[in-house]
C-alpha cells in the first residue's frame, strides 16, 4: 500500500533525483530506467486493471508452469502450491512469479510460499499453519520479489512505475538509506542471475535454502 500519495507534479522532480543517486552503479540505473520507461497519464495511485495486462500475466504464469485457476484468491489461496488464483490485478498476479522465483526450493510448493496468508488469500488459517518464514527474513524476500515482479511488468510493456510507487520504492526519495536498499536488491538479484546485465528479468530460480541465504544477506553490509 502506498504510504504517501504521489501525483505527476510530485513525481517529476523525484525521478531525476533518484536516478542521479544511482550514477555510481550502472546496473541499478538500467533497472530504474526500465521501471520508469512507461509513465501513464492520469492517476498514479491505482494499479492497472487492463484485461490485456491480466492476460499477459496469466500467460507468464503459464510459461513458468503454474496451474491457472480462474477464481478470486479471497475464496482460495493466491498460490496453493501448484496453481495461482488469477482474478486479481495484473501487477499482483505478476508479483506471484517473483515469489515463485525467489522462494527457497523447499517452500516453492507450499501454500502462499510458506510466507503466511497473503493479503489477497482468503484461507488464512490454512496458509498461516504452514508458514515457515517470518520477519525480518520475510521482509527481505518480499522486497526482492517486489522489484523482480516490477521488472517483469516492465518486460511486458506494462506501466511498472505504478507498482514501483505503490510498493513504496520511492518513499523517502533519494536519501542514502532508500537508494542503498535499492542498490542492494539489484545487486542480489543479479548475483542470483534473476536479472541480466541489462536489468531484464530471467527465468532462473533461486536454489539456496533459507538458512544460508538469509545469513549471507544480513552479513552483507556493503
Image (tube, rainbow, N blue to C red):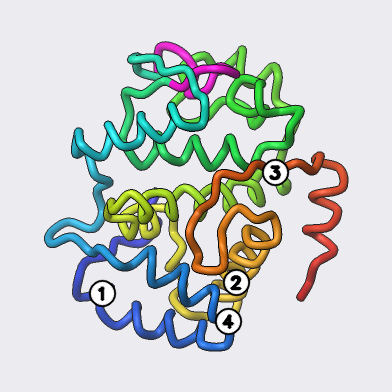
Residue identifier under label 2: 183
Q: Residues within 10 Å of mark 3 (few under 14, many from 20)?
A: some
Residue identifier under label 1: 10
Position in image of residue 222 (x %, y %): 76, 76
- Distance (Cα) linking label 2 and label 3: 19 Å
Position in image of residue 220 (x %, y %): 80, 67
In the rendered structure, the answer to whether residue 29 lies left or right of residue 133 reads left
Tag nearer the camera, 3 or 1: 3
- Distance (Cα) linking label 3 and label 1: 36 Å
For the residues bearing labels 4 and 2, Cβ distance under 8 angstroms: yes
Residue identifier under label 3: 206
Mark positioned earlier in the residue sequence (1 or 4): 1
- Distance (Cα) linking label 1 and label 4: 25 Å
Residue 86 in the image: above or below residue 221:
above
Mark positioned earlier in the residue sequence (4 or 2): 4
In this view, the residue farthest toward the left is: 42
Position in image of residue 190 (x %, y %): 63, 62
What residue appears at the point 19 percent right and 75 percent down from the top-left corner? 9
Residue 140 in the image: above or below residue 51:
below
In the rendered structure, the answer to whether residue 60 lies left or right of residue 41 reads right
What residue appears at the point 65 percent right and 67 percent down from the top-left corner? 187
Mark positioned earlier in the residue sequence (3 or 4): 4
Secondary structure of the residue carrying tag 2 is helix
Q: Which mark is residue 25?
A: 4
Secondary structure of the residue carrying tag 1 is helix
Q: Residues within 10 Å of mark 4 (few under 14, many from 20)?
A: few
What residue appears at the point 44 percent right and 87 percent down from the top-left corner? 20
- Distance (Cα) linking label 3 and label 4: 23 Å
Tag nearer the camera, 2 or 1: 2
Nearer to us in this view, 136 or 162: 162
Q: Residues within 10 Å of mark 1 (few under 14, many from 20)?
A: few
| The magenta segment | 74-84
Amino acid at each position: 500500500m502506498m504510504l504517501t500519495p504521489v501525483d505527476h507534479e510530485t513525481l517529476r522532480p523525484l525521478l531525476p533525483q533518484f536516478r542521479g543517486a544511482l550514477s555510481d552503479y550502472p546496473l541499478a540505473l538500467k533497472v530504474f530506467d526500465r521501471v520508469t520507461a512507461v509513465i501513464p497519464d492520469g492517476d498514479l495511485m491505482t494499479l492497472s486493471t487492463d484485461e490485456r495486462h491480466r492476460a499477459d500475466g496469466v500467460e507468464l504464469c503459464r510459461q513458468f508452469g503454474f496451474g491457472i485457476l480462474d477464481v478470486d484468491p479471497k475464496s482460495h489461496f493466491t498460490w496453493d502450491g501448484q496453481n495461482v488464483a488469477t482474478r486479481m490485478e495484473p501487477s499482483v498476479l505478476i508479483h506471484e512469479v517473483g515469489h515463485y522465483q525467489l522462494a527457497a526450493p523447499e517452500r516453492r510448493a507450499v501454500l502462499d510460499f510458506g510466507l503466511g496468508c497473503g493479503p489477497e488469500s482468503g484461507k488464512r488459517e490454512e496458509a498461516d499453519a504452514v508458514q515457515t518464514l517470518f520477519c525480518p527474513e520475510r521482509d527481505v524476500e518480499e522486497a526482492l520479489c517486489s522489484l523482480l515482479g516490477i521488472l517483469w511488468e516492465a518486460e511486458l510493456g506494462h506501466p511498472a512505475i505504478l507498482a514501483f510507487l505503490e510498493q513504496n520504492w520511492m518513499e523517502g526519495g533519494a536519501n542514502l538509506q532508500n537508494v542503498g536498499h535499492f542498490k542492494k536488491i539489484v545487486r542480489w538479484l543479479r548475483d542470483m542471475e534473476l536479472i541480466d546485465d541489462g536489468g531484464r528479468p530471467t527465468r532462473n530460480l533461486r536454489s539456496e535454502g533459507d538458512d544460508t541465504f538469509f545469513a549471507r544477506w544480513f552479513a552483507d553490509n556493503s
